[in-house]
Amino acid sequence: MNPRPTPSLLLALAAELAPRHGYNVTPLPNIRILRSETILEDVPVLYRPGAVFVLQGSKQGFLNGEVYRYDADHYLAVSLPVPFRMASQASPDQPLLAIYFDFDLHLAAEIVTTLDGQVSHDDRTPARSLVSSPMTPPIPDVLGRLLHALCTPRELAILGPGLLRELHYHVLVGPQGGALTAALRRNDKADRIVQSLTLIRERYNQGLSVPELAATAGMSVPSYHAGFKSLTGNTPIQYIKALRLHEARLMIARRKGSIAVIAAAVGYASAAQFSRDFKRHFRRNASQEAGWMREHLGELA
């Protein structure tokens, strides 16, 4: 039997799995562990759907006037990829250690469907893209068993899929799970906006217009605009621009081409306009931002 997952045990396991500064990959592709020793302020981020569990240090997310805490007592759940700003606290003596868990969206949808079949849900619960929830006892327990399995290949091969399923479940039924699952339900009123986000993700580098997106969603432009802003904290145009810039940021850090080539790849007709937008968003030019990412996040594969 594995030892009970005390905070010190969770930290020891996470530190073993994350010896390097920045993101450390694990044998499970949807689990990464971040080690950071630096205080960060007002950093633009775009998280994948999933959850972030901070074991040491703390983070705050800022979106549309709201503050989302994720620290030893709270975790951040993300139902939709939305751009927001982030700050974090860490030091060399007490580095930030955080587990980044990406949803398997098919599994998440299956769990939500099963839950809906077991109990009725309240259609009035508004869908939310970000949710900060208290760290309830089942979460550290499954995280401890998952980290232990990640350190033990034989155990991971047998127990890994079940542990991931269990972690999905506990996030989706957490204290504010209703707001999270409302964004994942296929019959929810937010579904048309969610499908629109999928379309944007597929065609972000093309000439998408708000009237076209609204028509595809079967909504009027004002209704689409209001629903989009409510769910993502961004207007459609802001969202598309941020998505393009974050995609370009990754391509630059991975050395995928010149600035002009990357600007065109993400949908910019003008490299000069791309450079202006990039510096306005990240407050550094492209080469400075690539250096910052390698310093703080490690080499991104």
Image (cartoon, helix red, strand yellow):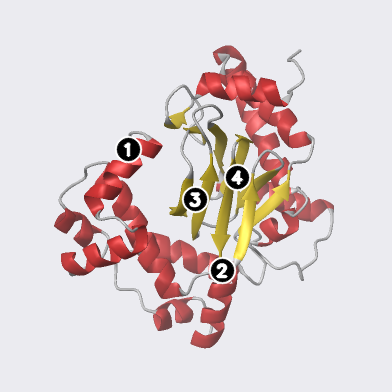
Instruction: Say above or below: 143 vs 219.
Output: above
Q: Which residue is mark 2?
A: 64
- Residue 63 left/right relative to 119: left
Tell me which numbered mark, 4 or 1, is placed earlier along the sequence: 4
Q: Which residue is mark 3?
A: 47
Q: Between residues 167 and 87, which one lies in front from this camera angle? A: 87
Q: x and y percent of residue 206 in the render?
A: 29, 68
Q: Amino acid at mark 3?
A: Tyr
Specify the quadrant of the image occupied by residue 148.
top right
Residue depicted at 58% across the width and 76% down the height: 227
Q: x and y percent of residue 160 in the render?
A: 61, 25
Specify the quadrant of the image occupied by residue 299.
top left
Residue depicted at 28% across the width and 42% down the height: 291
Dot 2: within a 10 Å radius of its alpha carbon, few (fewer than 14), some, or many (20 or more) residues? few
Q: Between residues 272 and 219, which one lies in front from this camera angle? A: 272
Dot 3: within a 10 Å radius of its alpha carbon, few (fewer than 14), some, or many (20 or more) residues? some
**Quadrant in which the N terminus appears:** top right
Q: CA distance from mark 2 to mark 1?
A: 29 Å
Q: Which residue is mark 1?
A: 294
Q: Amino acid at mark 4?
A: Ala
